[in-house]
Image (cartoon, rainbow, N blue to C red):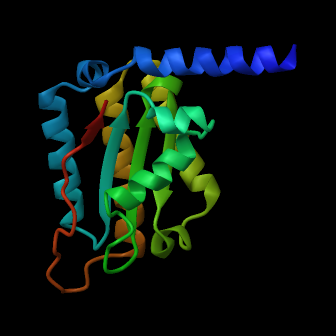
Amino acid sequence: MAATNRSGSRLLRLLKHRRWDVTDARRLLNPAALQRLAAQVTASEAGHSGEIRICVEAGLPLSYLWRRAGARERAIAMFGKLRVWDTEHNNGVLVYLLLAERTIELVADRGLNHQVDAATWARVIAGLREAFSQGQWEPGLGHAVAEIDALLRQHFPLTGERQLNELPDAVVILG
């Protein structure tokens, strides 16, 4: 009986993730919203040495579902694939949304993560979750970017050096 339950739950999870696709992500964040969020990231990065990336994924790839991997594992993988870890001051932050499970993950590089406590990150996630529950996708992400911007300005302000934009500012949408 337990094996049947596990198989059934695995199948339900697979179906839930296959039901969501890139068109769902683009419906929640239309091209104008994506441009505004990218512009906000660009403006933010003019005031600190950090990098902010936003990644929205409709559903996990089959390889993740098959081995029962979760959103956190995928967010960490995307942190690497999008090269957020590869910043000069180790102060990149990835905001990762998994639509199929309505999961939010924040992954901060070690330079910033050593400066910010878990309760602060939990507050950023709680704000995002609240905004999303009200259908406020763009405002929620915008507010999260503003909060991350404040943390980066506090811990990694520009000190006269010219800020290089090490990573693209566009929101990444995955199907």
Point out residue 127 in the picture as x, y percentages from the top left corner: 49, 37
Using the image, determine if residue 106 lies above or below residue 141.
below
Q: In which quarter of the image is the C terminus?
A: top left
Which sits in the foreground, 19 or 154?
A: 19
| Total residue callouts | 0
The residue at 55%/48% (across/down) is 73
Image: 133 above or below 55: above
Above or below for 127 versus 92: above
Image quadrant where residue 136 sits: top left
Residue 72: percent from left, percent from top: 56, 46
| Image-based side of 119 in relation to 131, left or right | right
Let me know if residue 124 appears in the view: no
Q: Residue at x 29, y 31 (%)?
A: 138
In percent of the image, x 81 and y 20: which residue is there? 3
Residue 170: x %, y % from top left: 19, 47
> Can residue 80 be seen by looking at this rendering?
yes
The residue located at (45%, 54%) in the rendering is 77
The N terminus appears in which quarter of the rendering?
top right
Q: Which residue lies furthest to the right in this view?
A: 1
Percent from the top left, x then y, of residue 151?
42, 63
